[in-house]
Amino acid sequence: MAQLTCKNLSISYGNNLALKDVSFEINSGDYVCIVGSNGSGKSTLLKGILGLIPRKAGEIFFDKTVKSGQIGYLAQQTNIQRDFPASVYEVVISGCLTKRGIKPFYSRKEKDTALKNLKRLEIEQLMHKSYKNLSGGQQQRVLLARALCSTEKILFMDEPINGLDPKVAQDFYALVKGLNEEDGLTVVMTSHDIGEAMKYANKMLHLDTSVVFYGKIEDYLSSDISKRLFGGHSHGKH
Amino acid sequence: MENIRVLFSQGFIIRALVVGIMVSLCASLLGATLVLKRYSMIGDGLSHVGFGALTVAMVFNLAPLQVSIPIVVLAAFLLLRLSESSKIKGDSAIALISSTALAFGVIVTSLSGGMNVDVSDYMFGSIFAISKNDVYLSVALSIAVIILYVLFYNKIFAITFDENYAKATGTNVGLYKMLLAFLTAITIVVGMRIMGTLLISSLTVFPALTAMRLSKNFKSVIITSSLVSVVCFFVGIIASFNFDLPAGASIVMANLGAFIVFWVIGLVLKRE
């Protein structure tokens, strides 16, 4: 039973068709990496699934285990303001809002969830620090903690390591992989770095306005598309 | 001291103080979000629309608040819409609407016999401008704004910090932004009587900016700016009474003073 089903999805910006007839299913516990060149529709696909941009045609649905809005999302960093006065704790607990519905204040339960996720990502010592004063890697962990407050099921990440230095990026990937393997969190990530992404994902979605390939990493490596990209070697580096 | 005792023995001063404190609180609560979401100019635009509405109310001898509130609320929704459309950039759209409304107000006044004392009061604010009937409505509206803000505080934080995330995780962002526009509109209309059309937007912008010099989290920005706002209102009113200055302008000057003090402290703390 698929956790997320995307059926004949098309999205356009004005007259430009950004995504055409995209269909795929993602199962619980999958780690899917969406790859493709610039302008292939990777970010558009994520935003479409999350309802941030209107879709032209097609359907997207989650199975019953993912309650409405209970998903996590790590956007490309650019849209958060640099001078925003918010503490790490305030940012993380805001991820619990979805579960509150119309009820105005956080209860003990949400406060515990926020603390648990701060500990899980080893950032509890930053709790009262100002978000704007953190390093890029720390900020990304804070946003991941917020995402984990929103969901235990499925996490979407749009180029999550953009702007992080390689060591910090490695740590971040390892952290997400741990959540995927130990907690069964489904991960859907876009990346322009195919080689790096293949180390962690178990499924590959190669996009070029339409789906070029979707399936297991192993099958992707032996497919014609990857042979063309990597010149016949299946080492996963380019 | 003698002056202050005289101050508190006057009915109109008490009325102005009560309404002023309530409006200062409302304005400072909303201010943080308006500043951080780059909506500062919406307050300014709305006050000009409020001026246009007030002149019409005056010419036709209608109750000023009852006429201007619905008009300004509608304008707030329109401005919000415009500031998000990509065709005309938000700030220029606001400038268009606010100057048009101001021009409309000026034409209406000149057709009806030119600038009189009342109009000048609306432009620059006056503590005499609030009638007894207005006080009850103003206070009730302010309390409603504060209650709604507190109830939706967490949602407002989430939308201010990261609108896309809130939207992706199922918060009805459009609805809460309408709520913000609504609360801002009410605060502006109630506050412009004391502060004046031309000065009311400073009441939303100044305390938030002042608090942000020192505060490290959102809650302390909100609390600090509320305190700053109320204290500056008092200082401004007392100065205005003592030295016979216009109330709105004195309050703005008090806010400027607070801003400079906080800014310097912030610089010193950073240095250490």
Image (spheres, coloured by chain):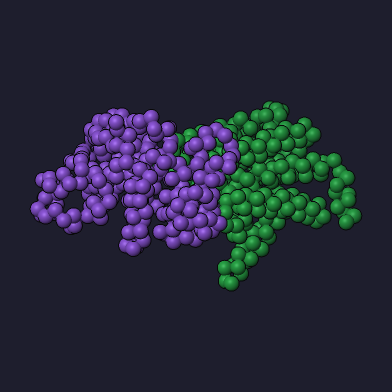
Chain colours: A purple, B green
Relative to A168, is B248 on the left or the right? right
| Residue B104 visible here | no
Percent from the top left, x then y, of residue A168?
36, 61
| Quarter of the figure that contains the C terminus of chain A | bottom left
Label total for image: 0
Q: Is B74 situated above or below B219? A: above
User: Residue at image x 43%, y 37%?
Assistant: A70
Quick one: which residue is furthest to the bottom in this view?
Answer: B272
Relative to B21, is A51 on the left or the right? left
User: Residue at image x 48%, y 34%?
Assistant: B172
User: Residue at image x 32%, y 41%?
Assistant: A29
Quick one: B240 or A220, which is closer to the camera?
A: A220
Percent from the top left, x then y, of residue A85?
54, 54
Percent from the top left, x then y, of residue A30?
29, 42
Quick one: which residue is furthest to the front in this view?
Answer: A182
| Quarter of the figure that contains the N terminus of chain A | top left
Q: Is A182 situated above or below B143? A: below
Quick one: A188 or B216, which is closer to the camera?
A: A188
Residue B256 found in image quarter: bottom right
Relative to A65, is B73 on the left or the right? right
User: Residue at image x 86%, y 43%?
Assistant: B10
Relative to A65, is B9 on the left or the right? right
Percent from the top left, x then y, of residue B25?
68, 45
Q: Is B265 situated above or below A73? A: below
Quick one: B22 or A3, which is closer to the camera?
A: A3
| Residue A99 visible here | yes
